[in-house]
Image (tube, rainbow, N blue to C red):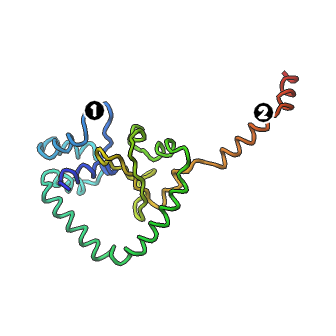
Amino acid sequence: MRPKQILKYFLYSGYGPEIEKDENITIEEIVDRLTTDEKETLIFITQRMIHYPSEKANLLEFFEGPEKMKEEYIQLLEWYYENIFSSVEEDIRKLNEEKLKELKKRIPDVREKTLEKLSLSSSDIVKKSNIYIGVSYYLGIMAASATLSLDKKGYVFVIGYDRKEFMDIEQTQTVSCAEVFGSLGHPQRILIVKELL
């Protein structure tokens, strides 16, 4: 993956600002501008990204030196895998399989509503033809999930274990309403209402 793609996905993943529809600019164009104009990068990070000052300084370095950022990021991932993740990898793989089965059961027939619930950034996402949904042991971002664009291939939602319930349509409430309206729709009750009127 090219360094600029890493920066693009970083902005997509919920850690960067939401790009407003009326800006008429793509995330790729933003990354291009931020990696070539130091002044614009400084303004963008200072005004539009919600991070501590020390983190903003790191972000400035990311956009000023994408190649170095990628190299350091890979080193961090390698260290993390070797020292932390490798010891729990098999357990998490099994958990992910279980949670993915659970997730499939949670997705109702009305998929469009489910995807609207997941989409934090744009309802246009539900109109895409290819949408991939996965689970993650670690990731429970904000109200729902991380949403990443996969360019022309579609979109991917990564849902933390603690956030799967967010997708549920409240079946109990639906059933309860149906029972009430079913009772009100009974012919004898309609006759009573007519008499009362």
| Residue 161 x/y as whole percent | 47, 61
Q: Quadrant of residue 32?
A: top left
Would you call the spot at circle 2 few (<14 residues within 10 Å), some (14-19), or many (20 or more)?
few
Residue type, numbered disc 1: Glu
Query: Residue drawn 17% across and 45% down?
Result: 42
Q: Which mark is residue 98?
A: none
User: Which of marks 1 and 2 precedes in the sequence?
Assistant: 1
Query: Residue drawn 28% across and 54% down?
Result: 52
Circles 2 and 1: CB distance less than 8 Å? no
Q: Nearer the viewer, mark 2 or mark 1?
A: 2
Q: Which mark is residue 185?
A: 2
Q: Is residue 43 left or right of residue 172?
A: left
| Residue 40 x/y as whole percent | 16, 41
Marks 2 and 1, how far apart at CA: 50 Å
Q: Is residue 12 left or right of residue 69?
A: right
| Residue 90 x/y as whole percent | 39, 75
Q: Quadrant of the C terminus?
A: top right
Q: Is residue 147 left or right of residue 182?
A: left
Residue type, numbered disc 2: Gly
- The residue where tag 1 is placed is 23
Q: Name the residue nearer the viewer: 11 or 40.
A: 11
Would you call the spot at circle 1 few (<14 residues within 10 Å), some (14-19), or many (20 or more)?
few
Task: Say which element carries label 2.
Answer: loop
Query: Residue drawn 46% across and 66% down?
Result: 97
Task: Say which element carries label 1.
Answer: helix
